[in-house]
Amino acid sequence: MLRNYAMKKLTSTLKVTFFILVLFVAGLFATGYGYLIELGVKVVELGRATAGLEDYIHFDVREISKSNLPQPWELHKNYNTVPATDALNKLHKDHKTVAFLIFKNDAIWHEQYFEGFNDSSKTNSFSMVKTIVAASLAKAIEEGDVKSFDQKAKDFLPWLKGPYANEVTVGNLATMSSGLEWEENYDNLLTITPRTYITRDITRVMKSIPINDVPGKRFVYQSGSTQLLSLVLTAATGESISDLVQRYFWNPLGAHADANWRLDSANKGVEKSYCCFNSNARDFARFAALFKNGGKWNGEQIINSEYVQKSVTPQFENGKDYGYGWWLGTHMGKRFFSMRGHNGQYAIVFPEDDVIVVRLGHQQLPDLPNERHSADYLGYMEEAFAMLAYENNSPNP
């Protein structure tokens, strides 16, 4: 009797628990938080709750082939003759660098890899790829698929909604001034950024987000603007953003290794184009060198020089450190512009010095007070030029 009663009690409890669980899951999907289920599954699979350098291994991707004519980088005559400074070695150790390169006069001057990575190892670009997506808009304009930076985004995305959906231009998307309702937050799993990272239908998510503020008035950094821009480019050209980047840049720049771009789902999936372009340090540097050299590569004008200048010019009073996808600044009296990504992915260009610094790794410091960059970002610059100064001052470099 007691055993039968206990079994009935357990069965009843399990039924109630299951019913509550079903209601909870249904509630998550009904309120737009169903992605938390998949996020939880991925956290268990990966053993971590944060985005990583090699996430492409665990998600669907679209392959991007290396160049038809791969072009190796020239090695500088003083390649790896100057050792890293103690301060640089500490930065590498403290923030788990996997690749650090210094290019001088379009040749590799210094190159180090860590944790088994090498010159062909793919890592997550994170937001560095926003610079490439913005430049892809300029190429689409050159080819006539988009009329101008002032063309309305709704010409390509008629489903845009919100009080200012009819006003936002493709240029607003490229300069982070779209007026999109979006909170850029990597830590709160209930915000839109983690949701887009895990969703299996990113277009549906973007259709749910309104243009609520007046576009073109002020800079507000938003991954969603870049995602919308890539959807514009796909609609305008009929090609995926992966195919466009391969055609516009990766092939003519002589990329030496295959890359890939993470998708929201298999087969006909859509790229997570605000992040998740997976390539290597040497090939990321090609894009930096293209803009350092005014849009030319091996004497060929790959992208309009007027756009190159426009892209590294501030567009808004409240965004003097941002152009079209490029972060801008001065440090040590030197002007620079850079591609930047989460956890310290950097490709930093010093045009007057003919120097490029590339750093890829697992971690970075928080932003400095009242700044939109971290101390390690400046530290990599400082130590690179300390090494270059040592070469210049040494009687036998």
Image: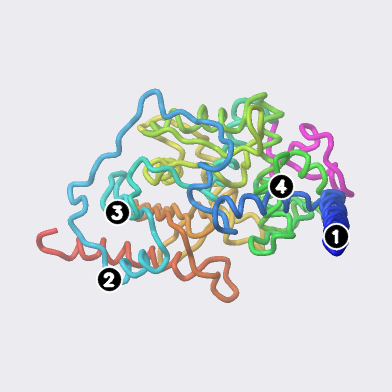
Label 4 CA crowd tier, 10 Å (few <14, some 14–19, many 20+): many
Residue at x 41% of width, y 27% of height: 67
Pick the residue in front: 279 or 372: 279
Residue 29, x across and y down, in percent: 83, 49
Q: Which residue is mark 4?
A: 172
Precedes in sequence: disc 3 or disc 2: 2
Secondary structure beneath label 1: helix
Precedes in sequence: disc 4 or disc 2: 2
Q: What is the C-alpha distance between the residues marked 4 and 1? A: 55 Å
Q: Which residue is mark 1?
A: 13
Camera-nearest label, 4 or 2: 2
Label 1 CA crowd tier, 10 Å (few <14, some 14–19, many 20+): few
Label 4 amino acid? Asn
Q: Which residues are magenta?
A: 147-171
Residue at x 86% of width, y 44% of height: 161
The answer to whether residue 293 is above or below residue 333 is above
Position of the N terminus, as image quadrant, is: bottom right
Q: Quadrant of residue 129?
A: top right
The verdict on residue 130 being magenta is no
Label 2 amino acid? Asp
